[in-house]
Image: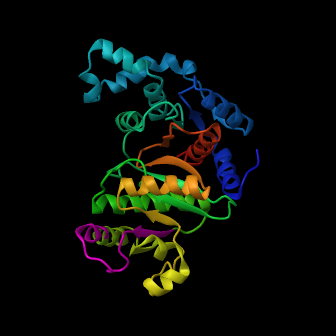
Amino acid sequence: MQLNKYQERIIEIGRKKSAKLVLPEKNDPRVSLAKRQLRELGYDLLEQEDFRHREPQYREILEQESFFHRMSAETKKNYMESPLNFSMMMVSNGDADGVVAGAVTSTSDVLRAAIRIVGIKAESRWVSSSFFMISPAADLAYTFADCGVIPEPSSDQLASIAGESAILHRLLTGEEPRVAFLSFSTKGSANHHRVSHIREAIITFAEIHPDILHDGELQIDSALVPAVAANKAKNSPLAGNASVLIFPSLEAGNIAYKITERLAGYSAWGPLLQGLKKPVHDLSRGCSSKDIVNVATIAAMQKL
């Protein structure tokens, strides 16, 4: 397996953390192949069957949650038997360090299980997602967000998405993030409530993350092309070299990452979930075994 510089970094850090991962969709051939490849790379993958003896303890803990307590006995039984739910319980209770699912499960089901069982971390109010995008030559990498979770983020949510994405980008690349809040307007070239909304997010972000380089609102060319930035955003601290792209809506982010992947040939790793207490990551149902391996190595790298 030939590795690019980003994969080498992610795998090196992840191996040192000795993370224990769960990939619950074991009947899918892509997942089976990914598990074999991950083991060849030296990762520790757990099988749920080896932890079924913990079910009484897991159930006792879940009984404290109102959503589970209200279920009928039959529904509780089915809930505990779900490989997805059980893998989340393994992580929540410290028997595993991360979960990667979504090859055959919808994003909504993965999110629901993660939020209910693993939970949102204290310093976060929302769960969002990002995609780590690597160029065909593997000489450039960007983080796109939110491309998979929050349809119409509020200004506070945009600020949160940007903060989580910037921190993740720094972890994955070892480079300081350069955050661009994207719009159809560059620095007041248009006035619209959707632009005002982004400006409010930038103010909030600056208050929370004064140390992270950022700018907005910017059109995509002003964020990525130095010559355009010199003309349209002359005083931008990003100078057309953004690395973290924050989209104003889910539809914009989702369309952008897929166009970048399909037409420009970028590798798209994700959706990487942000804001949870422990690493849980989703997959596109169109993913390959290679995609699963890539996302799993990130989960291992994020072991707490």
Q: Is residue 244 left or right of residue 293?
A: left
Which of the image's four quarters has the N terminus?
A: top right
Q: Which residues are magenta?
A: 178-198
Tell me what residue is drawn at x 41 percent, y 23 percent.
58
Q: Is residue 248 magenta?
A: no
Q: Nearer the viewer, residue 148 or 42?
A: 148
The picture quadrant where one finds residue 27 is top right
Q: Position of residue 264 (x, y in %)?
A: 59, 59
Against 101, is 121 above or below?
below
Tell me what residue is drawn at x 69 percent, y 51 percent.
12
Residue 233 visible from this viewpoint:
no
Q: Nearer the viewer, residue 2 or 126?
A: 2
What is the residue that sits farthest to the top in this orientation? 74
Q: Position of residue 294 (x, y in %)?
A: 62, 45
The picture quadrant where one finds residue 77 is top left
Against 168, is 30 above or below?
above
